[in-house]
Amino acid sequence: MLNTTLNITGQWHAAYTITRHEKRVFAQLKGKQIDAFLPLCRVAHRWKNRTTVMVELPLFPGYLFVRVPRRSRVDVLATPGVVSLVGPRGNPWPLSDFEIETLRAGLDHRNAQPHPYLVVGERARIRKGPLSGMEGILVSIKNSLRVVLTINEIAQSVSVEVDSDDIERIYAKASASAVA
């Protein structure tokens, strides 16, 4: 997990990067003393010579997160490898401080891996542990439960392994037409 905590003012934004340049961009932002967060996951990679090694890859390929005041956005955009901040031109979408800070604190304690972006499904809230309060979609993979956490602003999701005791179902509110 790569992150810096040098500049704590401003809002969190997702920065879209050139493919496979996330770590390089992160290092440049760190050099500019910009608060940045690049969540990584460890993946086994098998080379052509049949050697297997563990590599750290971005959890959200093509994205990293920056916390900058409005006047410093140009510093991020001027960084080689940054394509844009996610959102309408000139007014990028702010991300929730709660979501980013919870991800920063909790991803090291869960077996996180990229997951396809999901829109529909059973919603669940993590009740215990470092990702407590995060909401997502409950899925079952190879006899284990995972909650898919989604950051809608960048259309990216990540799944984290959970124990059934650590989650609670979120019930959808009935609409007025369904009640009548």
Image (cartoon, rainbow, N blue to C red):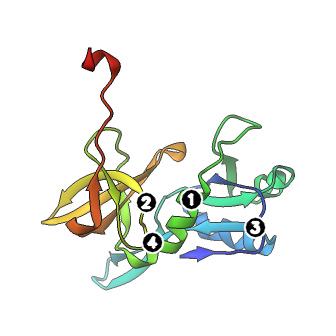
Q: Residue at x 34, y 50 (%)?
A: 116
**How many numbered discs, if any?**
4
Q: Earlier in the sequence, mark 2 or mark 4?
A: 4
* Viewer-closest of 156 and 24: 156
Tag 1 near tag 2, CB within 8 Å: yes
96 vs 118: above or below: below
Q: Residues within 10 Å of mark 2 (few under 14, many from 20)?
A: some
* Viewer-closest of 79 and 35: 35
165 vs 122: above or below: below
Residue 133's tag is 2
Left or right: 33 with respect to 111? right
Q: Earlier in the sequence, mark 3 or mark 1?
A: 3
Location of mark 3 (residue): 8
Location of mark 1 (residue): 98
Marks 2 and 4, Cα distance to the nearest angstrom? Answer: 14 Å
Give the secondary structure at mark 1. helix
Give the secondary structure at mark 4. helix
**In which quarter of the view is residue 4 placed?**
bottom right
Residue 107's tag is 4
Q: Residues within 10 Å of mark 3 (few under 14, many from 20)?
A: some
* Badge 1 amino acid: Phe
- Closer to us: mark 3 or mark 2? 2
Marks 1 and 4, Cα distance to the nearest angstrom? Answer: 14 Å
Can you give x and y, in whole percent of width and height, for residue 180 in the image? Answer: 26, 14
Residue 128's tag is none
Can you give x and y, in whole percent of width and height, for residue 58 in the image? Answer: 49, 66
Marks 3 and 1, Cα distance to the nearest angstrom? Answer: 14 Å
Spot the residue most to the left.
143
Left or right: 37 with respect to 71? left
* Badge 3 amino acid: Ile
* Badge 4 amino acid: Leu
